[in-house]
Structure formats: C-alpha cells, structure tokens
Image: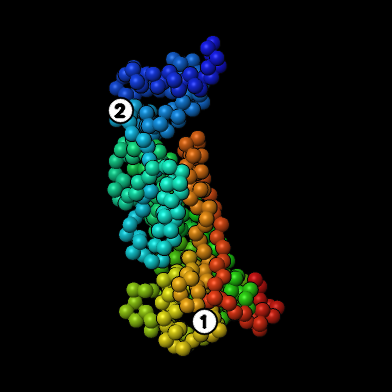
Amino acid sequence: MNQQGELKKDYAYRRILEMILNDEVLEDHFPAEPEFCRQLGIARVTLRSAFKRLEKEGYITRSHYYGTRIVRNRTEKRLLIAANRSMFSNSKIALRAELEIEQLTALCRERNIPCDSSSLYFLQDAEKISERYFGVVFFGAAMRGDEPFLQVLEESGVPAVYIREDENNNITDRFASVGPNIRGAWIAGFEYLAKLGFRRIATLFSYDKRNFQRLGFDRDAFEDFLKQRGYTEAAEMICNISTKEDDYAGRLRTLIEEKAPDAVYCYSDHFAAELYHVLHEMGKKIPQDVAVLSFGMGSDLLTPTLSAVQLNSPLFGQTVLSLLEYLQENPGKAPFIELPYHILENDSTASVRLEGMMNENFKV
C-alpha cells in the first residue's frame, strides 16, 4: 500500500493505464520486466497482476515472441473456438465435437462472453490472434503435432485449450487440454458387456494407425489385452471394418453369420448405425440375438435405442472456461483436465447371458 492508501496492484494498474492513455510508451513497447519494476517501484508479481488486468480489458497484448505491447484500436476481446471443419465429414467424431461446440457457445451466451468461430487453418497471424482474443479453444483429431497453426497459437501467447480426441498425441505436452481418458473409456465398454454375461463379443475395429492414436491400442496389442483379461473368445473376433469398403454391409453380414457373436462393440456410432441396418435385414433381434454397444454418444432415435460409452460430459463447457481463467494466472502451464465418461444404458444392451455371468474362470 502506498502513501495514498492505494494497494500496489491498483497503483501499478492505474499508472500503466495512464502511460497508455497519455502516449508515454515509446513505439508501444514496454521496458523489460526487471527494468519496468524498478521504474515503478513494485515487485514482478505485482506488475504481472496489472498486466493481466490490462490484457483482459484489451489495452495490451502479451506473448513470448512479441513481448508486451499496446493495442491502439482497442475492442472487447473475445473467445475463439477453432476446429478443422473437414473433421465434421468424419462421422466417427463429428457428433461429439459438434455437441461440445454447441455446449460451449451456449455457456458463453449465458455468461455474456463474446465468441467467434473459425477453421483451424485460418490461424496464420499470431499478432492478430493476440490482439483480438483472450483465449482459444481448439478441436481436432488425428493431428501430427507439426501443423502450422499450432506454432501460430504458441507464438500468439494467448491461453489455448485443446479438446482431446486422441489417447496418443503430440499436443497435450504443449497445450492445456480437456477430455476423457479415452483408453480407459474403451476398456470400460468391454467390462460393461462382460458384466452382463456376454462372452462372444465381436469388435468392429480398424487395423490402421488411427486406432492406435485414438484408443492407445493397435490390433495386436488389443488382442493381447483381451487374452490377458480372459476375453478369449472376443480376442478371436476383432473384425477389421472400414466404411470405405465397397461392400461394407456385406462384411458385417459375414461377420454375424460366421462368428455368431452375442454382442458387438462398435468403434463409433456410425459403425453401430450401419450394423443396425444389417441386423434388421437378417431378421436378428437387438438385443435378444445380438447386443450392440457403441463408443461415442449413443442415440435415442434408433430402434431399439442405442447404448454407448458416452464421452461427452455435462461439465465440459464450465471446465474449459475455468481452465482458460487458470491459464491467464499461470501462463506456460499445460495441465490435462480429465473429464468423466459413463455408460449410457439404452435398449440395445438390455439383456443378460446367465451362462456367461456364471463363468468363474472369466476375469472382469
């Protein structure tokens, strides 16, 4: 507190604001922090507190690359929600991402937080991002980690939160992130079916690198995991399926005829919806003949309603905004906030296999 009874953090904020408004800062660049603290007679933590307040109000921008600079054409800073829009053509992840974007924008409206949306590939100017936005939330699956927009985000110095889509990635060590434990969620789906007594569990899986990136399993590792857990029959029923195949429905029909599963665990809601068509055409009843579990969202619109390992959390929007506030206080941090997933129990798994439930040798 100074002689006028003013707290040092308030004094620092007021004095720096006066310097901005009175054009006392040469070329819009502030001195380096140690020198500026000496000039103002304050500690570095007090200076950073004032800078944070001024940045939030849109008077300055701060980044590792550009330092602390004055914003001359000040407007209210906004939240930027960025996604690779081409990923919405990929039905494996589109529904979850779209719902989370809707949830986040609705919460911003409720809290009167202005926000914009953009494609990730438009993020090419770090200085503009720094001037216009107080935070960035970005979505994207199957990223390599060397995409140009990731470097631009780092250069901007704006707090950024990645919405985690993949178990294995090169992003969460660089950016704060929010999402479920995807590998754990995938395993939980199998355990759920096993507790219902299903033993002949077929898996609609893809043997490409994408599965390893998303789930943390390649085909061989997944087979070994099932055998170790006692899913001996299921380990022999991992089916390589792709919606790009010419006779996708035919492959599913062959799976049902040759393997005779009592349950099918689907890599995505899209796989599950296609499986419904095939099972109905074959005269199979769900779940009496074949239970179906999806990995994603599930649906009440299908008949019977589709069960799923649901990855979307009602805590999503609130968690993202709270994490952005934390990053403003703690720049340079990259925490991962793990959100809960749960099993959505609908009609497609409303059945039990008593014989399987009494199998004492099976390890759940």
Left or right, residue 338 beside residue 62: right
Residue type marked 2: Arg
Label 1, on which residue? 286
Residue 263: image location, x then y, percent: 54, 79
Q: Nearer the viewer, residue 46 or 167?
A: 46
Label 1 or label 2, whichever comes before in sequence order: 2
Label 2, on which residue? 72
Which residue is located at x 52 percent, y 57 percent? Answer: 313
In which quadrant will I find the C terminus? bottom right
In which quadrant will I find the N terminus? top right
Relative height, residue 249 to residue 364 (above, below): below
Indicate the secondary structure of the residue bearing disc 1.
loop
**Callout 2 environment at 10 Å: few (<14), some (14 to 19), or many (20+)?**
few
Residue 32: image location, x then y, percent: 40, 23
> In which quarter of the view is residue 23 placed?
top left
Distance of label 1 from label 2 (alpha carbons) = 64 Å
Which residue is located at x 41 percent, y 77 percent? Answer: 274
**Callout 1 environment at 10 Å: few (<14), some (14 to 19), or many (20+)?**
many
Residue type marked 1: Ile
Which residue is located at x 42 percent, y 83 percent? Answer: 278
Which residue is located at x 62 percent, y 80 percent? Answer: 352
Relative height, residue 121 to residue 47 (above, below): below
Q: Report whether residue 195 is seen.
A: yes
Residue 297: image location, x then y, percent: 48, 65
Q: Report whether residue 232 is seen.
A: no
Relative height, residue 251 to residue 96 (above, below): below
Residue 248 image label: none
Relative height, residue 86 to residue 175 (above, below): below
